[in-house]
């Protein structure tokens, strides 16, 4: 996750102030060490404000590690294995790391309570990055929306990543940024509501 992405999520959730969010499920943002030390802005900008509002947050990941409440492979699980649905489901920067994103999107919808909210982000343009795989899934906003049939889109946003110093990892992309100033890393952010 990028810092800019976490800031947008924090601001949007604060401005929206959605009612009746008691239980939150975070799908795929790794373990406690990653969320609080490797990328501490994930906890600072997203999960701390939710906890401060009294939300109970559960974390689902493939890794059996500290800070992971549900250990599952999202491509091979069902809602029955967790046994409940959530008021808010958050899935950030995961869909490019699964072989069947459509199947995962269907699961995310199923994990969201009726009238609940679903927040999904995915890179629109970003370098190849393994965790443990990268399928290079980089959907347009329209393609992303179509993966969530029946969900009401509340807010959609393309975030441009501006901190170029931090992401100077690919010589070709940096060369393209120099030649074409509009070339930049982008993340699609989508916030939806489940029909009641």
Image (spheres, helix red, strand yellow):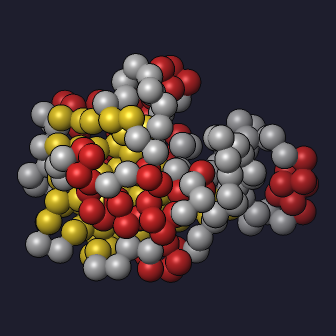
| 157 up-or-down from 121: above or below | below
To which quarter of the image does residue 71 belong?
A: top left
Name the residue rendered at 12%, 43% in the picture: 22
| 14 up-or-down from 45: above or below | below
The residue closer to the viewer here, 185 or 104, is: 104
The residue closer to the viewer here, 85 or 186, is: 85
Residue 173, given in percent of the width and then of the height, sits at 84, 54
Name the residue rendered at 80%, 41% in the picture: 168
Name the residue rendered at 41%, 69% in the picture: 156
Residue 152 seen in the figure: yes
Name the residue rendered at 52%, 50% in the picture: 94
Residue 90, given in percent of the width and then of the height, sits at 35, 50
The residue closer to the viewer here, 120 or 64, is: 64
Total tally of numbered discs in the picture: 0
Q: Is residue 166 left or right of residue 8?
A: right
Residue 114, given in percent of the width and then of the height, sits at 14, 65
To which quarter of the image does residue 165 belong?
A: top right
To which quarter of the image does residue 98 belong?
A: bottom right
The residue closer to the viewer here, 85 or 10, is: 85
């Amino acid at each position: 996750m990028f810092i800019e992405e976490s800031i947008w999520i924090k601001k949007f959730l604060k401005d929206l102030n959605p009612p009746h969010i008691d239980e939150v499920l975070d799908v795929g943002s790794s373990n406690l060490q990653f969320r609080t030390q490797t990328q501490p802005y994930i906890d600072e900008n997203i999960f701390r404000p939710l906890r401060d509002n009294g939300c109970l947050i559960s974390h689902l990941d493939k890794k059996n590690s500290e800070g992971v409440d549900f250990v599952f492979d999202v491509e091979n699980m069902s809602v029955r294995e967790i046994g409940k649905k959530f008021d808010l489901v958050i899935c950030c920067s995961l869909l490019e790391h699964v072989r069947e994103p459509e199947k995962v999107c269907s699961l995310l919808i199923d994990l969201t309570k009726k009238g609940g909210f679903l927040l999904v982000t995915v890179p629109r343009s970003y370098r190849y990055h393994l965790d443990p795989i990268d399928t290079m899934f980089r959907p347009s906003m329209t393609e992303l929306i179509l993966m969530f049939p029946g969900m009401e889109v509340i807010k959609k946003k393309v975030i441009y990543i501006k901190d170029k110093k931090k992401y100077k990892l690919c010589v070709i992309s940096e060369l393209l940024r120099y030649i074409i100033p509009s070339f930049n890393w982008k993340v699609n952010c989508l916030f939806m509501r489940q029909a009641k």
